[in-house]
Amino acid sequence: MPRPRKSLICLQDTPYYHCISRCVRRAFLCGEDRFSGKSFEHRRQWVENRLLRLAKVFAIDVCAYAVMSNHTHVVLRIDRDKALSWTTETVLTRWHSLHKGTQLTRDYMQPQRRAAMSDIQIQSVMATVAVYRQRLYDISWFMRLLNEYIARQANKEDACTGRFWEGRFKSQALLDDAAVMACMAYVDLNPLRAGIATTPKASAFTSIKRRIKAANNNEQPRCLFPFLGNKSNTADGLPFSLYDYLALIEDTARQLRVGQCEHIDVSHSPITIQTGLPHNQWHAMVQGIETHFSTTVSLSLAARRCHDK
């Protein structure tokens, strides 16, 4: 029996989560349907556009993503403090960019109408704002507004009704830096494992492609949670070097390409050293985040699994 979502998302444990949504239909979310010959490849852009738009509205950062043929992967980071710092006007502006809100919240955003509102009406607006504020750092709401939008678009295009997604999204709590880095690599390398790309740079509709393209200009994508390196304050970014991550991704991609016939040692990587992940555990985690772990991922769980083997 599935556990309640509220028991899976705990900000006291970690702000980082890996979320997976799978399509229920025979017809793909994206790609080409070999039965009808119809291409759904354009839907990848739907997902990417919607995902990155929501990240601009919510107090939730996108660390990694991959839009596959029948499922999506995202690694998200919740910034509750950011949401709590927003003014009432900021909360309403953000929420109204996605929903109409209530008549009272719309009136509140117009100075002349606000001036005519009673104290009880203002109190009602404040209570509604508290609800909206909480939703804007809630992963369940983030995924709901992503998946419902795509389902409606697909249903409209297919001229049908009914469920588009298999069920509620699956989530995994990433409890430490090792889990976050390994899960990001798992997501970024998903197209290589699936055989639809040969290099990270060629992986369409993924965060890694965006990061590589930006890195070629000595930049980082504004739409993604940045790498800040070994800085004392990394609250607004990942505590690793972007170029160390890209090098580690390339080494891990080579391991995926050669399989077991050649051993690629990543123990020299500053990231595996910094996180304390031995190279064998790194490869095991990157290849088996979904299959080897349930609702939580951590270095200690990875070490225990390797010891059991």
Image (cartoon, rainbow, N blue to C red):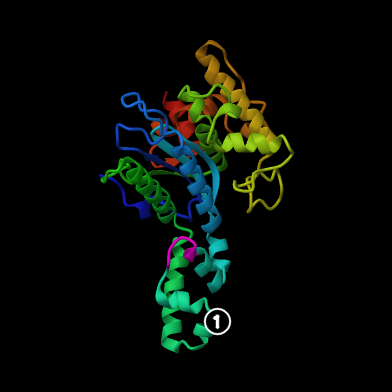
Quarter placement of the N terminus: top left
Label 1: how many Cα within 10 Å (few below 14, some 14–19, many 20+): few
Q: Residue at x 54, y 36 (%)?
A: 206
Query: Residue 11, position in %: x, y?
Result: 48, 55
Query: Which type of secondary structure does the marked residue at label 1 adopt?
Result: helix
In the rendered view, tell whether residue 8 sits above or below residue 250: below
- In the rendered view, tell whether residue 254 sits above or below residue 282: above
User: Mark 1 highlights which residue?
Assistant: 111
Give the residues in magenta.
95-100
Please give the name of the residue rendered at 45% of the width and 64% of the height, measured from the top-left corner. 134
Q: Is residue 138 above or below residue 152?
A: below
Whole-percent x and y of residue 145?
41, 53
Q: Closest to the observer: 294 or 117?
A: 117
* Position of residue 199 measured from the top left corner of the image (x, y, whole percent): 58, 24
49 vs 305, nearest the viewer: 49
Q: Is residue 93 visible?
A: yes
| Left or right relative to 52: residue 292 | left
Residue 59 location, x and y as percent? 53, 58
Residue 96 magenta-highlighted: yes
Toward the viewer: 285 or 130? 130
Kind of residue indicated by mark 1: Pro
Outermost residue to the top: 261
Q: Is residue 225 left or right of residue 101?
A: right
Q: Is residue 282 magenta?
A: no
